[in-house]
Image (cartoon, rainbow, N blue to C red):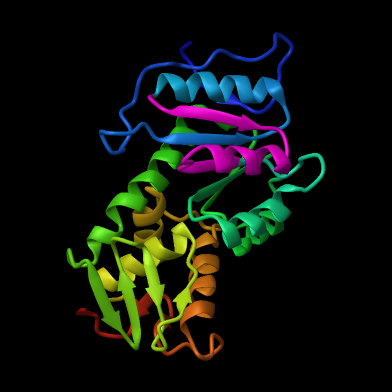
Amino acid sequence: MDGPAWCGASSGTGWQSPDYTVIPVSAPPTRRPHLLIVEDDEEIVGIIRRYFTAQGFDVSAAANGVAMREEIDKHMIDVILLDLGLPGEDGFTLTRYLREQWKGAIIIVTGRGESIDRVVGLELGADDYVTKPFDLRELLARVRSVLRRSVDAASAANGADALQFAGFHLNRAARELTDAQGKRVPLTTGEFDLLCIFLAHANRVLSRDELMNSLHGRDAGPFDRSIDVQVGRLRRKLESDPEQPALIKSVRGAGYMLAVRATRA
């Protein structure tokens, strides 16, 4: 097929066949990355499954929240592609559950393109948001991005396995943050990676485009506020007063800056 491989809407002749040219993925050599598709449309599931299997992924599928929990219990899942319009518990409810009970990456894949849905999804802890119909190669790039971030973003923090800043202790190997009292601060994959980027460039202003490119491999569009949403989430977990942030400061017209020095623990 000459055009882009896409999925999520049908045409008069049915689904278009995707391009199965293999694109290497960033993954540990000892284990194939495992993708879980939480989607009740069997046709969409089939197309995504075939495409990602051809790219070197193990792929599982679940049509609802009950089946999703069973798959998470059975397999070591790396990334979940989560539809919002599911029978029973909807995607927002499942996103909230996953962020409380699971540490992997969540990419919402849905036909809801309204900005409010995107903001809600990101606020609940999703790492990315893709609307249908989508280009399968773009979806692959998004998945590769969150996988790469889970391996590489922590390494950006000056190569240190453990860092201390403003009373917090970051264990890079365990991907765990604890506060001054030793209490664990739960972070999503996206929040952890964003924090590592800030720590690697402490006291330096980072533009929204720089942050978006580091997290998602693309620049921020003129109406894309996802970085602002992620920074807001991270502030609520780090700042004593998120409305008057002392750690992650906004620099008008320039971006954000982590205004603290990080040291090796």
Q: Nearer the viewer, residue 177 or 196?
A: 177
Q: Residue at x 56, y 87 (%)?
A: 243
Q: Is residue 255 visible?
A: no
Q: Is residue 123 visible?
A: yes
Q: Residue at x 68, y 46 (%)?
A: 113
Q: Residue at x 41, y 64 (%)?
A: 192
Q: Quadrant of the C terminus?
A: bottom left
Q: Residue at x 49, y 42 (%)?
A: 79
Query: Residue 185 magenta-drawn?
Result: no
Q: Position of residue 201 (x, y in %)?
A: 25, 72
Q: Nearer the viewer, residue 76 or 43?
A: 76
The total number of labels drawn is: 0
- Quarter occupied by residue 236: bottom right
- Quarter occupied by residue 9: top right
The magenta span reads 56-81
Q: Is residue 80 above or below residue 249?
A: above
Q: Position of residue 211 (x, y in %)?
A: 37, 62
Q: Could you tell whether 184 is left or right of 38 in the image?
A: left
Query: Residue 68 magenta-drawn?
Result: yes
Q: Position of residue 175 (x, y in %)?
A: 36, 62
Q: Nearer the viewer, residue 265 or 205?
A: 265
Q: Is residue 87 above or below residue 215?
A: above
Q: Could you tell whether 173 is left or right of 222 in the image?
A: left
* Residue at the far front in the pictured view: 74
Q: Position of residue 81 (x, y in %)?
A: 57, 40
Q: Is residue 48 above or below residue 39?
A: above
Q: Is residue 180 above or below residue 190?
A: below
Q: Could you tell whether 168 is left or right of 77 in the image?
A: left
